[in-house]
Image (cartoon, rainbow, N blue to C red):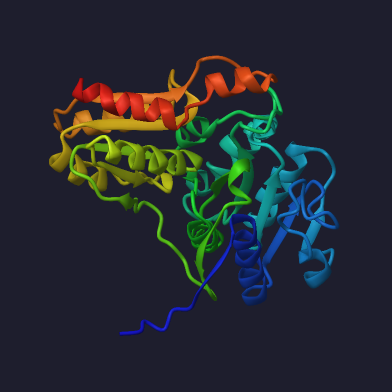
Amino acid sequence: MSTGIRMKEITYARALWEAFDEAMSRDERVFLMGEDIGVHGNIFGAMYGLQEKYGGKRVRSSPISEVAIVGAGVGAAALGMKPVVEIMFVDFATIAMDQIVNQAAKLHYMTGGKVKIPLVIRTQGGAGTGEAAQHSQSLEAFYAHVPGLKVVMPSTPHDAKGLLLQAIEDENPVMFIEHKLLYATRGPVQEGYYTISFGKAEVRRKGKDVTIVAYSKMVLDSLDAAEELSQKGIEAEVIDLRTLNPLDTETIITSLRKTGKLLVVHEACKTMGFGAEIMARIAEKGINVPMRRVAGEDTPIPYSRVLEERVIPNKGRIVNAAISYFD
């Protein structure tokens, strides 16, 4: 029986573009702002053509000032607009930490609910492009730590579009973090306007022997690892968190009751990384299973491609970590 939903295969970048096109055509309060976002469509070209379609007032290239970009977004959101501001690299969102942490995340609470901040802060994280220590970090745990912020990290084109539209609809500030290496990836995406609710993980692959929990690009690496593990007689279940805050622990627990083993995978440094929070929540629920992490090394990302590959998790490390449960 046909559901009436039409799908097409497009890139992750195009899915984001379509989300903006859908949102901006429906609501004149939605506008975009960021460095080189206008004529160039940002440094990755993902927004190319939106300024021509919607004009310079709704797609605004900004000065090179993260403080100004986020600060203006907070003010516009407080006055009833729905801004989507872009920070070129998540590394430089640190420059705007006061605006993000002390203003965007706090104003609704500090005004007793009188002020809403429907602000989306889009940024790009992750390594693998040879851009060295100041342009390659995975800092999502910073923002997941802050009450008042929602943190979204889609792994597929379909989720990128649906979660971005949900972020724009949300009346709270959302950190929307994309991995640079995902922009060219392709996948089926629903046509038209649709949203994906926050706080609902997706089981990307069924399995019975070990649960692999990941998000963003590491979901793709985990799926590749699961296929290799299957050839070795180990069936891994792969869970894509999609959002870190809110976090869906119930889907993880349901899987663990079947597999009895947890492997958390993230690109960020291991120490104080988000994987530790996942494990802590599972332990607090009284789920007594062995747990392991595959994470980035506790070091700045090297410029050397050889060294960069050494410190970032990959399929091989995920496979080895999973196999170690059965040695």
Q: Quadrant of residue 192?
A: bottom right
Point out the image quarter for the N terminus. bottom left
Which residue sits at x=43%, y=32%?
315
Given residues 60 and 290, the one toward you in this image is: 290
Q: Is residue 151 left or right of residue 223?
A: right
- Check the image and report above or below for 296 versus 52: above
Which residue sits at x=49%, y=54%?
156
Image coords of residue 149 (percent x, y): 49, 43
- Residue at the front extreme, as displayed: 231
Point out the image quarter for the C terminus. top left
Q: Is residue 28 left or right of residue 10?
A: right
Q: Is residue 294 left or right of residue 41?
A: left
- Check the image and report above or below for 248 versus 168: above
- Check the image and report above or below for 269 versus 44: above
- Looking at the rendered structure, the number of numbered marks drawn on it comes to 0
Given residues 91 and 100, the one toward you in this image is: 91
Which residue sits at x=26%, y=21%?
324
Which residue sits at x=54%, y=19%?
310
- Residue at the top extreme, as displayed: 299
Residue 290 in sight in this render? yes
Given residues 68 and 116, the one toward you in this image is: 68
Residue 301 in sight in this render? no
Image coords of residue 153 (percent x, y): 50, 46
Given residues 118 and 8, the one toward you in this image is: 8
Q: Is residue 199 left or right of residue 102?
A: left
Q: Quadrant of residue 65?
A: top right
Image coords of residue 69 (percent x, y): 74, 45
